[in-house]
Image (tube, helix red, strand yellow):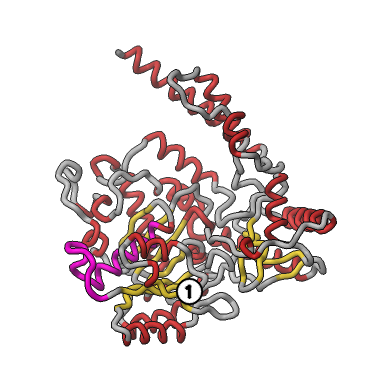
Amino acid sequence: MATVRNHHRMATVDALAQALEISKACVASESGRLPPVREAGALHAELDLGLGEDGCSFEELVVRLRAIVEASPNSSNQRFLNTLFGGREPAALVGEWLAAVSNVSMYTYKVAGPQVLVEQELIARMSAKVGYESGEGTFTPGGSLSNLTAMLLARNEAVPNAREDGLSGTPLTVYTSSDGHYSIAKNAGILGLGRARVRRVDTDSEGRMKPDALAAMIDADRAAGLTPVFINATAGTTELGAFDPIPALARVARAHGVWLHVDGALGGTLLMSTRHRRLLDGCEHSDSFTWDAHKMMGVPIICSAILVRERGLLQKHLNESADYLFQTASDDLNPGVRSLQCGRRNDALKLWAAWKLLGDAGYGVRVDKQMALSVRAAAMIAADPDLVLVRQPQSINVCFEVRGAASVAVCAELDRTGAIKVGYCATGDRCAIRLVCVNPETTDADLDQFFGEVKACAARLVRDDLPPTPPSERRSPQQ
């Protein structure tokens, strides 16, 4: 038996060593081109992804794994400017690996031990940054689920019997800006509120929710016999990176007795910067706050937290009795009583490792570099006669167009060839290329290369007389 155990341990060590070698190769190639887009069926066959009755040798598995990784986009590549995450903090990567090796579940102190204390330290620190003096929180599998948790709490607080008896009677309404994240409507459907009860509030010229329009909508709904239960303020919209005016929205929420949530999935990390945290002024008056560390903090996906101002609400609305699970320690040390999940992976250790290494000050420097990148990118666009800056960036999203070229077509061609991975977005009646300056390792030379590739691609498309973009392609779903 001891021989079998030793063999298994050595196999595990060998597996980690092989994974490290593949990872080194992946990191070494980050300055090169991204893999071009391949037809899915052909790629499935080439990578030999099929599963069968018989297994394969470990050596063959390593070959297959390497091929899969090499064919996958790498979000830390300097040419990957597509989404609201990118780059990495090495300490967080170490934390991610070690969390996988220990493989504990974050529902009880009995199972997770000190990892619960790690998570509690993070929740306390993040709550303090938001301004929640005695708040609480939990980690979730992404910002959409953090928003879902907040909406569930708001629903149950507004309808005290909803958890026990379900929903009945007065229809409930939810409010978010016309540029808010799509998870608000999705979650309204999940929670039985109804997607049709989500009110899209008008925004100003900068993409920020109008408080007067919100107040008018709430008044109209109340007059119609509806019950407003949830206001979603966005701190960093997906497309423009805009910040809703939280102080004014908080006043509306208080005056009307409605739960105020701040979706800071993108912009919450600006709380780490003394220079830029003003964009989140007033967030201490909210009832809940979503914060995705896997975006601007350089932590591997997924690492999202939902923070709640009033301690005890998570357990009040999420706890269930389970003697087979919660067998030791107090509820305070058993995160499972405050979570939507039972089994839950350890997403805290990677963030703790990066935060421990950098400290508040180091993360402040990181955020300031990201914000400065967007300012430089906007200046480059404004100085280039071939480019049009759609709006001055409020945060790390820079939206622009190439004169005479369709943004959708440019992004598609750059993706097809592996030159650049960048997305497009709708801004009013225009469709713009959305450059996300989330990787602080991006240099001015990288930006020069990016704009050069974009313009060269656009010139080729115009020369080849590509037809105009169909109207159906002018709007893109938010991430």
Amino acid at the residue labelled 1: Ser
State yes or no: residue 150 in magenta: yes
Give the farthest residue toward the right.
463
Residue 22 seen in the figure: no
Q: Position of residue 354 (x, y in %)?
A: 48, 49
Q: Quadrant of residue 263?
A: bottom left
Picture quarter with the N terminus: top left
Question: Which residue is nearer to you in this view: 225 or 291?
Answer: 225
Q: How many marks?
A: 1
Residue 415 seen in the figure: yes
Q: Position of residue 430 (x, y in %)?
A: 66, 70
Report the side of 373 relative to 20 (left or right): right
Q: Residue at x 61, y 43 (%)?
A: 73
Q: Residue at x 70, y 68 (%)?
A: 378
Report the side of 390 relative to 85 (left or right): right
State yes or no: residue 45 in magenta: no
Most common secondary structure along the magenta stretch: helix
Q: Residues within 10 Å of mark 1 (few under 14, many from 20)?
A: many
Q: Is 329 located above or below residue 291 in the figure?
A: above
Magenta residues span 145-170
Q: Residue at x 31, y 73 (%)?
A: 172
Q: Position of residue 390 (x, y in %)?
A: 68, 71
Q: Secondary structure at mark 1?
A: strand
Q: Position of residue 160 (x, y in %)?
A: 20, 70
Report the side of 3 relative to 55 (left or right): left
Q: Which residue is mark 1?
A: 177
Q: Residue at x 21, y 64 (%)?
A: 166
